[in-house]
Image: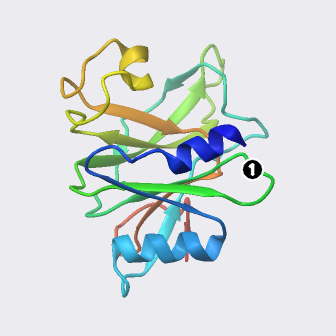
Amino acid sequence: MENTLKICEDSPIKGEGKYCATSAEAMLDFVQGVIGEKTQIKALTTITTHDISPLLRRYTILDTPQQIPTPKMVACHLLSSPYAVFYCHHTIDNKIKVFKVSLGRINEANGDRLVEAMVVCHLDTSEWNPSHESFRSLGVLPGTSPICHFFTSSNDLVWIPKSVATTPLVAAL
């Protein structure tokens, strides 16, 4: 709960808009306001093809990542809390790329696709805090390389305009 409050109360990264919604309706209102009031939207999410959790496992990328070209995107994550809290954020300048990536378990003999993961890449990190966890993990400095992160759960949503062409592995609203 303490971490959820910290995330929701911290100032956003420069060039980012954020909102903590306490209901699905509030989340949709925020997303619609960012993408466009009259634009139909859809949610993309990571999908597992077997009864496994994608967390804390080693995977290999099976195919070339499929870019999903989109003019706008809002990411929402369900946070740990006794009630629903969705942390939603978006880059104001839209310097991002969205990908769908097929993953398989390392050493998996038959190469089954176990996860169709959503990935968001931030192309401009020059305004990010130099102590951001991503820079520490990757050993890079702000603005020197894109930072990409996998959406590891079906509780993480990537909202895009419905008119963007994607595969059937999406939830449309």
Q: Position of residue 161 (x, y in %)?
A: 37, 71
Write down the quadrant of residue 132 in the picture: top left
Q: Is residue 123 left or right of residue 112?
A: left
The disc labelled 1 sits on which kind of residue? Ser
Write down the quadrant of residue 92 in the picture: bottom left
Mark 1, other Cα within 10 Å: few <14 / some 14–19 / many ≥20:
few
Q: Nearer the viewer, residue 11 or 40?
A: 11
Q: Which quarter of the image is occupied by the N terminus? A: top right
Q: Position of residue 20 (x, y in %)?
A: 55, 59
Furthest residue toward bottom:
38
Seen at 34% across and 79% down, the residue is: 36
Q: Is residue 106 left or right of residue 80?
A: left
Seen at 66% across and 23% down, the residue is: 56
Q: Nearer the viewer, residue 144 or 85?
A: 85
Seen at 21% across and 38% down, the residue is: 124
The secondary element bearing badge 1 is classed as: loop
Q: Which quarter of the image is occupied by the C terminus? A: bottom right
Say which residue label 1 marks: 81
Q: Is residue 4 left or right of residue 148?
A: right
Seen at 30% across and 40% down, the residue is: 122
Q: Is residue 6 above or below residue 130?
A: below
Q: Nearer the viewer, residue 1 or 66?
A: 1
Q: Is residue 132 above or below residue 75?
A: above
Q: Nearer the viewer, residue 11 or 35?
A: 11
Q: Position of residue 167 (x, y in %)?
A: 46, 60
